[in-house]
Image (cartoon, helix red, strand yellow):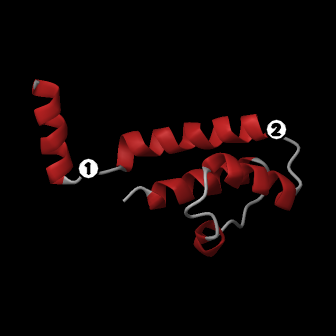
Amino acid sequence: DSEPNYYEAGRRTLAEYGVPDFTWADHEAYVGISTQETVADWKRRYGLRATVEELLAVKNRHYLGLARTSARAYPEMRKFVELLAGE
């Protein structure tokens, strides 16, 4: 499940821009919409001066770092990817 990583990436991003109290409940409002729409809403909601593009890049950087270190693949998916790689 990648949702905890999306939350943590968002929390870290907002903390960098002076919004220290982003909660899981806050995050849940953004489940199902694009990351670009999410950061555009953050810009408006929290009065952030950064561009949407900058916020998107920072959040993606945080997410990729988390995904590399803490995301777990389902065993079936790992087997599937290995099968595809062998073709």
Residue at left 55%, top 59%?
A: 7
Residue extending farthest bottom: 25
Q: From mark 2 to mark 1, how far is it between C-alphas? A: 33 Å
> Which numbered disc covers residue 62?
none
Residue 80 in the image: state x and y as whole percent: 15, 42
Secondary structure, mark 1, is loop
Residue 19 in the image: state x and y as whole percent: 77, 58
Q: Which residue is mark 2?
A: 51
Q: Amino acid at mark 1?
A: Ala
State whether residue 16 is above or below residue 87: below
Given residues 66 and 79, the one toward you in this image is 79
Residue at left 41%, top 55%?
A: 2
Is residue 18 in view from this perspective? no
Given residues 76 and 55, the one toward you in this image is 76
Residue 82 in the image: state x and y as whole percent: 14, 34
> Which numbered disc covers residue 73?
1
Horizontally, residue 51 falls left or right of residue 35, namely right
For the C terminus, the quadrant is top left
Horizontally, residue 83 falls left or right of residue 21, namely left
Residue extending farthest top: 87
For the N terminus, the quadrant is bottom left
Give the mark count. Answer: 2
